[in-house]
Image: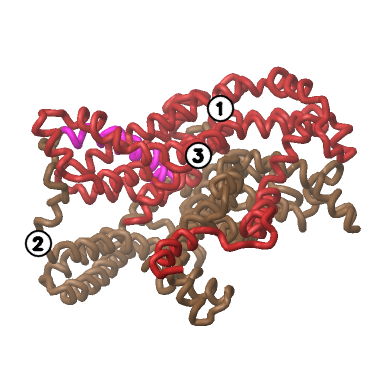
Chain colours: A red, B brown
Amino acid sequence: MSDLTMAGAAPTKLKQAPARKNAWLPQRWYVHLLLWIAIIIVGFPLFYAVLVSTQSQAQVFAYQFTPGESFLRNWEIVMVDRRLAGYMVNSVGVSIAVTVGKTLLSLLSGLAFVYFRFPLKWLVFGFVLLTLMMPTEILILSLYQLVIDLDWGNTYTALIVPFLASATGTFLFRQHFMNLPAELSEAAQLDGATPVQFLFQVLVPMSWNTIGALAVIQFVYVWNMYIWPVLIIQGQERQVVQVGLRSLIGGDASLVYGPMMLGAVIASIPPVIVFVLLQKQFMSGFAVTRDK
Amino acid sequence: MPAALPLLLTAAAALIGAGLMAFWFRQSLLPVAAGAAAGALAGGAGSLLFMLPLDYCTFSPESQPIDVALGLGLVAVGMLLLLLPVYWLAGRLRGGWRTLLASDAPPGSFKGWLWPLLLLLPTLAILFLFLYYPALDTLRLATQTSLLGIRGTIFVCVDNFTRLATDRSYLQALGNTALITVMTVGISMALSLLIALAAFQPVKGARLYRTLLIWPYAISPVVAGVIFLLLFNPTGGIINYFLGVVGIEGIRWLNSPTYAPWAVIAASVWKSMGFNILFYIAGLQNVPNDLKEAAAIDGANVFQRFRYIVLPLLSPITFFLLITNTTYAVFETFGTIDYLTPGGGPLQSTETLMYRVYRVGIQNNDLGNGAAQSIILFLLVIALTVFQFRSSGSRVNYGA
């Protein structure tokens, strides 16, 4: 073999996997094995919940590890008798309203902080950023009194409006906008665009990753909110699903696991779907905050 | 209370403030007289910050030593709150008065002052009305005995705070919170790092594996509570079934004050792992391969490479996760606890500080006591965050 052919062959050879004895095993099979064990451990509680949601109480107590035939019966108990369908609709509405509103307000404040010059900007930004240190949970008692004073008790307004402003969102969009070239806004001004036109026609199309990241965080946060709706919403009409799950546990009878697990699984579907769909955006959106 | 006391305290505070700021202004080469004047003003005003609303009630004749100590503490905190901005402003002032008013903006910023005002108005209004105002209002509530929904209130000075110091069930809740927080954060982060070490490697189907590992992030604390209510149930619960297979019988997880906190910890660990795995995978992917290879050539084994190369480079992520996980364990476990062990568990063994705020403030209708607990909880979380910042400051590696 001449040197010339050697030089030509070497790179392609390097790319190939080294010859292995057990060709039927995937490469680095132990990593795959470890990962599957981890997935099974992490997933087990939910898998088991899904399994139980198809079973009758007797089958649960008998530790039957195959699907039962009570799914439709459980479905009826959960969705119709215990009105989970209504709670789900309420949760979807509140979560979408807060997510959209928060994203919008954060875009507006991000625009103001990056593309405008105004006195004491640092102070105003500090005012926004400081709220990161104030978890709503701490303020829950006086927030509750305030909302009652405003006569917002038992309304969606009380579930939505107090959560529309976001320091996280403002910060994420500010970081993102600051990394965009300045020529964008110069060009927009030459074209005579107003700031709002500039925001929606230039910035938003370039910000889908950040918007997606924020949407995941906010949707999951609002969907999973519990203590606030417990306080603010009385009765079943307007209750959200996290509180509504109580109706599958409390009160009249001993615990019936099938419907209970079905309820838990149904209540988890929307946030898990949103999260899995926007996973990539979620990660890259956070990468922005870690860079700076 | 001696009539001269308010005057005396204010004068002392002004003097201390003047001294501190004069020293600081001298250090930063600013006019000393201006520093002394600003310090005296801030110090004096700071001592009044809490004492005027409280009307010096902590120093009344029937005050206990603990009231007086708390009163002096409040004077000190008030001074600190007003002196810190002066201290910080002085740093900025070195660049001249202009830097205070100037704002950084890219070359292509828009003109006009009305626009930013309009754009920021909704955010600022909501933050003020629903965060800042309730925060201040919590301070007012904490000095009162007031019943939810009833207008009449009685001013009780700092009694709501001093009562907590001797309240055994409050101290128990503090212990429960410490146990649940430390165990949840520690176990969840350690397990997540282990799993992330397997999951970050570029094997076939890595993206699918990751998705299958991190989805519990989206599960709610409430759902975690519901599912673990089944898993831990003495009859029909799968955990006791498995334990029975290996010969351990009949642990009544949710009815035993010893085991109930661990059921909460297990559910919280499960729920928080997705988030931690996600960030550890991202962190591990940023560890440069050539560093590990170089160490391997130098003869470092797997564990040494992990200990001396990977772990230090992961420290910013670990630090970030430490803070977010602590906040999670302190506040968000509420939903898990309320479903898994309603009412705070057997003998209040799963009652955390947050759960107690709810139980005392809302269920027992003692708003003042609940507000005082909220403030202490807030200070605890802030202190913990600052402590974590401090203790990891020297070790966190931001190089990568």
Main SS class of the magenta portion in the image: helix
Mark number, residue B389: none
Seen in the picture, residue A248 relative to B365 is either above or below; the reply is above
Q: Is residue B159 visible?
A: no
Question: Is the C-beta separation of discs 3 and 2 under 8 Å?
Answer: no
Which residues are the magenta region? Answer: B115-138
User: Where residue A49 sits in the image (x, y, percent)?
Assistant: 73, 38
The magenta stretch spans residue B116: yes
Residues packed near mark 1 inside 10 Å, few (<14), some (14 to 19) or many (20 plus): many
Do tag 1 and tag 3 residues touch (Cβ < 8 Å)?
no
- In magenta segment, residue B328: no
Residue B108 showing in the rendered view: yes
Q: Which residue in the protein does label 3 denote? A: A221
Mark 1 = which residue? A233
Q: Is residue B67 above or below residue A51?
A: below
Q: Amino acid at mark 2?
A: Gly
Question: What amino acid does circle 3 point to?
Answer: Tyr
Under tag 2, what secondary structure?
loop
Instruction: Name the foreground residue: B174 vs A118.
Output: A118
What whole-number distance in Å separates the C-alpha atoms at marks 3 and 2? Answer: 43 Å
- Classify mark 1: helix, strand or loop: loop
Residue linked to disc 2: B96
Type of amino acid at the residue the image marks with label 1: Ile
Please give the name of the residue rendered at 38% of the width and 66% of the height, measured from the top-left corner: A4
Image quarter hosting the N terminus of chain B: bottom left
Which residue sits at x=19%, y=37%? B116
x, y (%) of residue B112?
11, 36
